[in-house]
Image (cartoon, grey):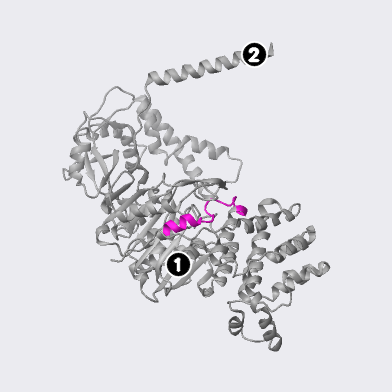
Amino acid sequence: MVKIDTSWDEQPVDITSEANFIWSIANKLRGTYMPDKYGDVIIPMTIIRRFECALEPTKDKVLAQYEAMPTYPARAMYKISGFQFYNTSKFDLQELCNDPDNINSNFKSYLSGFSADVQEILRNLDIESNINKMDKGGCLYSVVKAFSELDLSVAKFDSIKMGYIFENLIARFYQNVDAGQFYTGRDIIRLCVSLLLAEGSEDILEDNKVVTVLDQACGTGGMLSTAYTYLKHLNLTADVHLFGQELMGQSYAVGLAEMLIKDQNIDNFKHADTLKEDCFPNQKMRFVLENPPFGTPWGGKDAKQGQEESVKEEYLKGDSSRWSAGLPKTNDAQLLFVQSALNKLDDNGRAAIIENGSPLFTGNTASGESQVRRWLLENDYLDTIVAMPTDLFYNTELATYIWILSKNKSQKRKGKVQFIDATNIYEKLRKPLGKKKNEFSKENREQITKLYTDFAENNISQIHDNTEFIYREYTVMQPMQRSYAITEQRIQKMLPNISSFFDPVKFAELQSSNEKLSTRDVRKLTKFRKNKTIYDQLILILRNNISDKVYKSPESFAPVVENLLSTIVDNKLMKKIIDGLSQMDKSAEIQTNKKGDVIYDRDTADTEIVNIRTSIEQYMNKEVLPFVPDAKAFFEEDLGKKKPIIKTGAELPFTRYFYRYQKQESVEVLENKINTLENSISMGMKKLFAKKR
């Protein structure tokens, strides 16, 4: 087996002066834009200048060909420009500044000279409206002039260095977006790539190896760019194909710009909603890398238009669906992205997905979340979960995790899941970037990756069988033992049992309502009016027959109530009244059905969660029967019903497995601390009032 060096790191790239210069241009927008909107201008202008600098060496040749034949094919023009884009306008940013009075119209004319894909980028960045706004605010000329003096040529800034500039700008300008829509730092991406390549990836070293990488929530393309650089370092002959889908127009535009500069096939970079469509249905992927948005709804009123319909339509495809394991709650799409990632992987594919804590444990046994986790474990797709430190992202302090998914687990990992607690493995930034106060250094990444490849247990690495996290839900009940009596207390407890027959509170509410009643409420009010006389009568009869006498079986009590009420109520209501006048009583007779089988009391039902490796008999003998000797467990799963009853689920309670008990301080120590604090406050108050005198 060939060991891949995953500790590689790019040479330190200093883009401080360029980033600071670009940042300083934002000062020219003051008064026209609010600070949180500076990025709406600076990011597009940086992209325009980058394109302009990239095209400068071949610009004259492109113009000459365009003048000779304006209809010259775009793909042929790419060969002349040296990129998958070009510009046929005689203007550039420097030339625009020579005619300040017409800079608005000339700028738009210049932009219209770009080829179609750049036009799409500029539309998504809404550059024309910003040109108008800057012109109106009197800052258009100064902004264009400043950018015309910025050298972003390919010779000076390769794609790696340009990526750092974009990362720096995005971190500065987009610090206030929602928690799920943040830029993923390069340090985090490198860790994801290191973990992906650390095992089961030896084939990528083959000569001219074709490697496909997908990000279904690719944002500005940072994950794809970093993966590309990493893979090309490991194998210069590798033919790396990047695929991306991104919903947000501005992020997509930045990412597409970088793909153009990298000369990637831009047909593989789509402005699309992954929850609505798979843009590459016939293409399987060697690697999937993604950081889908946290807590973003896929259904309900807060979802994007058409998402819920698309997701449910896809789900109905059954086993061929991208989310065949189940649908999570509509308020969080993270586990949809997890399923879709696995759907896209080829037979030896691996994925690294960043999630928050929610997908680990939310949802009850039958929930979509639980069933997705169960599917991952039963199919042995879940390889490793790495808990990362907080304060790693520019826009959120949430606890986050890397999920490593694999369709080609090594023999030692089959049937296993590794948990790595890397929450204390990080370096502090000298100066925070938004909410990002921590980062992974090269040494940190090496340490975490070694924990992964060592596949050994220690205080921050645990290895568990898949079955450790799958459980069955049992209902435990006691035999039906109930006593019966007519007392005021029992009459009051019985009333909810017959509320469908008559409900005094609801009746008063409907009668006094000033609003027009619905058809349903009208029917209910009519029914209550009809039943009120009988209700009043039966309550009066019961109260007139209140007694201390207690009956130990329904057979002995039923004749008493029937004798009192049979002339005014039917058998169905009679049964509800008798049941309502009962209460659990372990001294009462054990009730049985006609076959003589014991009837178990639903009112005593309790839920027991039992790992699938543990027999219910063993569990009951240890955990239940010593305390409730006559209890019985029922496994009520029924998958054959039209609406299946599911009682087998899974959860991944990561934090519980790494919980360390901290002994509480003694009462004496706490008392001393309180006394010290009180004395300090008292002394402070005395000094304060002494000064006032």
The one nearer the camera, 451 or 558, is 451
Across and down, in percent, residue 436 comes to 53, 48
The N terminus lies in quadrant: bottom left
Residue 496 in the image: above or below residue 185: above
* Image spot of residue 409 (x, y percent): 29, 62
Rendered position, 57 above or below 3: below
Disc with the residue nearer the chain's start (1 vs 2): 1
Q: Amino acid at mark 2?
A: Phe
Q: CA distance from mark 1 to mark 2?
A: 69 Å
Image height of 408 relative to 173, above or below = below
The answer to whether residue 651 is seen in the rendering is no
Please say whether residue 182 is one of the residues in the magenta stretch.
yes
Could you say which quadrant of the image residue 97 lies in? bottom right
Query: Of helix, strand and loop, which one carries label 1?
Result: strand
The amino acid on which the numbered mark 1 sits, given as a three-letter code, is Leu
Identify the secondary structure beneath mark 2: helix
Say if the magenta span includes residue 242: no
Residue extending furthest right?
101
The magenta segment:
172-192
> Quadrant where the C terminus lies?
top right
Q: Measuring from the top left, give residue 331's x and y in whole percent.
A: 48, 52
Residue 214 shows which numbered tag? 1
Residue furthest to the bottom in view is 68
**1 and 2 marks in contact (CB < 8 Å):** no
Task: Provide residue 343's location: percent of width, then percent of height.
Answer: 39, 66
Q: Residues within 10 Å of mark 1 (few under 14, many from 20)?
A: many
**Residue under label 2:** 689
409 vs 558: above or below = below
Give the residue at the far left of this rendering: 596
